[in-house]
Image: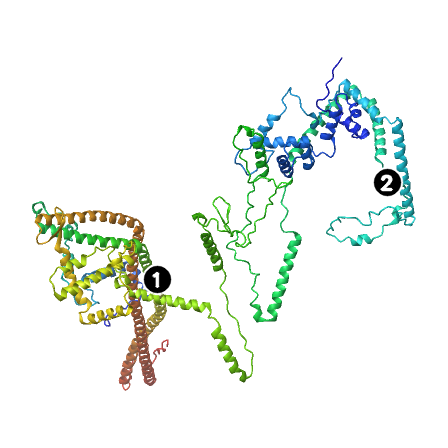
Amino acid sequence: MVDKVRLDALPYIDKEYSNPDIKEKIDKLIESELKNTQDKPPRFSIPKPVTLFEKNPILRAEYDRIKAKKPIEKFDISRYKLEPPPKDKEDDVQEWISAASNAASQLEHQYLRMVNLELLQQFGANAWRIHNFDLERILERLQDSTENLQNEITNINKLRKADQLEAGVKLKELQTRWINSINKSLQIELACKQLEAEVQDLESKLENAQDSQPTNDSS
Amino acid sequence: MKVVIKGGVWKNTEDEVLKAAVMKYGKNQWPRIASLLAKKTPKQCKARWFEWLDPSIKKTDWSKDEDEKLLHLAKLMPTQWRTIAPLVGRTAAQCLERYQKLLDDAEGQVEGSDLGLQGPAGGEGANAAGDARRLRPGEVDPNPETKSARPDPVDMDEDEKDMLSEARARLANTQGKKAKRKARERQLEEARRLAALQKRRELKAAGIEVGRKKKLKHMDYNANIPLEKKPVPGFYDTTEELKVKVDKSAMKGKRLQDLEPKKPWEVGEDDDEKKKRKRESKNKQDSAATIVNRQRAEALAAAAQAEREDAEKLAKRKRLQLPTPQVTERDLETIIQIGRQGENARNLAQSANVSSGTLLSDYTTPTPMRDIEARTPRVPAQSNTILSEARNLRAMTVQQTPLLGEENTPLNTSGGTGYGGITPLKTVAQTPNPMMTPARGHGSATQTRPDGAPMRDEFGLNAGTPGFSNSSGQKSLRMQLAKKLASLPAPKNNFEVVVPDEAGNDESNRDELGDGHSASKPQDQELVDKKRLEKQRVEEELELKRRTQAVRRDLPRPVSFVEGSLTNGDAGRGGGMATEIQKLINEEMELLTINDASRFPPRHARSVSLEPRHRLQDISDQAIQAARDAIAEEMKQTPVLPDILKEAIPQWHEYENSGIWDANKSEFVAKKQATTDVLLQKYRGEWKQRRKQMSLESERATKIEKRLNITLGGYQARSKALSKSIKEAFSEYEKALCDYGAFRSLQMMEGASISSRIEGATEEVRELDRREAELQAKYSELSRRKIAAQEKLIAVKTNGESHASSKPQSADQQ
């Protein structure tokens, strides 16, 4: 399919686009064409749709939620509260046991938090520094490669221009030759036509004469 | 009748007259001298001479040495100033005055300032004390003989003038018989001497050396001078100069008057005459007006003179008194020589033999500098002996009579000049020697008591007293010695034994000899020590092995142990063989635990005293080993450890949670039996405690978080900014990539289209060319046909003579 599409455009030779009238026309054409091909770019084949998070129902649900653009559910902070049992169940031993165990587990979480904080205190600054350093390197590399690409692009454009200008000279020469040849052939054709007419005339005359030879042809 | 009281302050004129009179009459005719001075008695004159005018009297400031001497002698010989004076080298009056001044200074000196920076004569206190003895207006000087003379007034009193003129006349009188004779004798003597001198010089000038006549009778003192002190040779060699002959011709043509300086009396006479003449001429010139001017000028000059004297007094300083060097020039030279000799010996030894080189250690390397200060230490502060002596003397003078029975005056005995001899005891300031080895310097062999006295007990008199135990002193001595010895370098025992090569048959002999030698030789101490240490180490290891596992692994173990808590608990249950065994085991375990707790208490715990009945007998290593083997054997049959744990942990938990603390009954209650109240109390308490803990913890955590936010906020912000710019950069990169692809494909496509266009164009052109050629061919055909037709027609015309037609020329051919 790609092979069949052939764009014969040499922007450095074809100066038509700089002509405003023609430009308008072309723009219109492009617009109309774009209207036709808005949704499906004709040149790229769309890959098969992938179903995400097939095996993970939680992530799937989250994905669906974001797809549906629903707001995120409110965070359940009840577990982080250290509430005593409600008033009506104040004498329930089981409630108190669960409350105490909840407190114990939260204390454990708190301990973990403290541990993490301490770790952060000890290594946080360094970790952040390393992280930032990595980010800087990434940014640097990205910028470098972008610059390289830009350079490549300008090189390509330079090459294109050079090629096209060279070709343009050749084409122009060929064009003049073509015009000359056409002129010449036209002239020759005309001359031929003339000559042919003359020849016909002469031949007819000759015939007449030959016819009148015996009878002394005169014209 | 006018009563004249003689005495009072001495005036300059009186002094001058006295001096002249002493010159004339000598120091024995004081009444005669005093007769020249109207206001002075012979005694006063004598005193004046001996206390002030004698040229041998020192009037300079008192030096420190003199002060010291004075105070010392005053201490030894109180109030005997006439005895002290010649020893000090001053007059008695001077000594007394100085003594009083020193004592006053000592009184006025601020207590405790022993730096002695102010000096004996300086300071506020000294001035205040000096004021006490100053003469007040109206008071009469008790001994004016020792004071400097009062200057002459410009206009002298009449009686003074009389006295002066009379004295002048009397002193200048040479008209007396005796004076005349004396003058003549003096002149003759001088003339004789000069004649002799002249004669000798003339002879010398003539080249005739006339040695001094040797006096046969008398001794030649110049030949052999006893105790002669030869001048110290200077820097330059003067032996050459001694050889140089004096140029004799320099003496020629000179008169005695040229060579000899003028005699003092001649000079005096000449000057006197000149002055007289001058004065007379001046007097003639002087008018009344100029006298005033001269007086003013004189006053100005006097003022200037006084000022100059004041400045001199101020500028005058005491001489710096430095102690004599402890190491003299000669000592230094000998030290250098010794060092050189040692160096030579070392060189010789090193060059001669390698083996003997090790005998000489290299002392040229400097001693380790860690003990030596970078700069010379300060000389230890010396107590001001003068001040302390003066204080002592003052204390003694103000002392009351012993009859009153008061306490003795406290005297400062530490820093004085002592009572040892006539010369004051002197401590020479020693330059501290930083290089001195500590053994000789500070390490005192005898210990000192707290009060500074050395502790000596060679005879063991104080053996009983605790603070004076000789053994402890010796112990510390030994320790000091050991410390010093420990700092010695380790011995280097690297030496070679060169066995001389001998014939083989001697070998057996020698071996025997060697064997016998080694057997008889005692073993090297180092080896013995090594063996002993090794043995000790092995012993320690064994000891370590003998301990129980709990001690060896430093497991948690009871600090104290209630006796019988193990045995009683289980003993009650059932009976029979098994319980008996169990009981035995428990007893043994208890014993072990108690022993461990006492002998090897856990860290930070005190050891429990061990009762003798609990003392564990030493168990033999074999028994321990056997027990351990048995345990290992049994362990093989029992399930492996994790399996035990699997069972044990739930059991433990169950056990742990089985009891509940009942606060009301204050005892543990089984969980199943507990009432809801107890349970509620327990869990509520737990919950409350945890909440409290939680709040504390969370507060801490938030605090830390806040701090972390501050410390890490910068990094976070930087990271955010970086990621943002990375996003931007990435989109840019994507765009560039896209562009790149597009332009690449464009380039390819354009290349294709260029070639296709050119191809098409050339094709078209070729086609046209072809067509042109065709047309040309056609044209030429046509023209040929035309020509043929024309020719034919002409032929026909010639035949018919009616032929006139234009023949088309061939068109522009290309």
Q: Which element is circle 2 on?
A: loop
Examine the rendering and report whether any part of residue A104 can be seen.
yes
* B16 sits left or right of B372 in the view: right
* B631 sits left or right of B534 in the view: left
Above or below: residue B810 compared with residue B314 = below
Residue B771: % across, % down: 30, 77
Q: Which element is circle 1 on?
A: helix
Residue B677: % across, % down: 9, 47
Marks 1/2: CA distance? 112 Å
Q: Tell which subunit mark 1 falls on.
A: A
Residue B44: % across, % down: 73, 25
The residue closer to the viewer here, B763 or B127, is: B127
The local crowd at label 2, few if under 14, some if 14 to 19, many if 20 or more residues have their Cα within 10 Å, is few
Residue B26, located in which quarter of the rendered image?
Answer: top right
Q: Amino acid at mark 2?
A: Glu
Q: Which mark is residue A128?
A: none
Residue A193, located in which quarter of the rendered image?
Answer: bottom left
Q: Tell which subunit mark 2 falls on.
A: B
Residue that numbered label 2 is attached to: B260
Please say which color scheme the image uses: rainbow
Q: Quadrant of the C terminus of chain B?
A: bottom left
Residue that numbered label 1 is attached to: A144
Q: Amino acid at mark 1?
A: Asp
Above or below: residue B23 compared with residue B446 = above
* B387 sits left or right of B619 in the view: right
The residue closer to the viewer here, A32 or B532, is: B532
